[in-house]
Image (cartoon, helix red, strand yellow):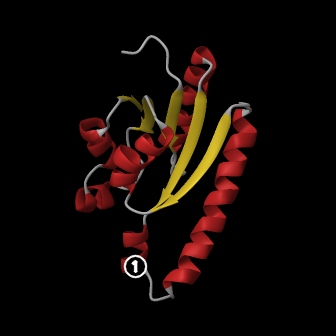
Amino acid sequence: MNSRYKNIMVAVDGSDQSEGAFFEAIGAARRNDAKLYVVQVIDDSSILMSSAQPMDDILSEETKRAKQYLAKLAERGRYQNMELVQYIGNPKRALTEELPQQYDIDLIYVGATGKGRFQRLLVGSTTGYIVNHAPCNVMVVR
């Protein structure tokens, strides 16, 4: 384990466990005087399968909702060195490849579960994927 982290990322999805991970990540960022990236990934593939609405309309709605959610979290967290990140794409790839590389992440916080049990069986556990494929340390919060 690193003795000091510089760039910490926390993935949030609105679940209780991801919010717990958010507050744990704030504590770690404060202890390490690190930059905290709060990330919400909008899964564009699940949007395509779940609605007959035009993709642009759905993405616009989801982006607006995500922006409001991230702003509320930031207000509750009150950490100065925080960046809110909205990302559209595959959550597994975004959280293990694209975003860690883009922001030079050295620690990822994630909730143990987020989606409903049935959906997790269909698409697999994003958390499990992150634990097994992340290029850095991962902290799973229950």
Q: Residue at x 40, y 52 (%)?
A: 94
Q: Residue at x 61, y 59 (%)?
A: 66
Q: Position of residue 67 (x, y in %)?
A: 66, 58
Image position of 54 (left or right of 79): left
> The C terminus lies in which quarter of the figure?
top left
User: In this figure, what is the number of numbered marks?
Assistant: 1
The answer to which image quadrant residue 122 occupies is bottom left
Q: Which residue is mark 1?
A: 48
Q: Residues within 10 Å of mark 1 (few under 14, many from 20)?
A: some
Q: Position of residue 131 (x, y in %)?
A: 29, 36
Residue 67 drawn above or below residue 74: below
Q: Residue at x 41, y 42 (%)?
A: 101
The answer to which image quadrant residue 106 occupies is top left
Q: Nearer the viewer, residue 79 or 34?
A: 34
Q: Position of residue 102 (x, y in %)?
A: 47, 45
Image position of 6 (left or right of 127): right
Residue 14 drawn above or below residue 53: above
Image position of 120 (left or right of 69): left
Kind of residue at badge 1: Leu
Q: Position of residue 34 (x, y in %)?
A: 59, 24
Q: Secondary structure at mark 1?
A: helix
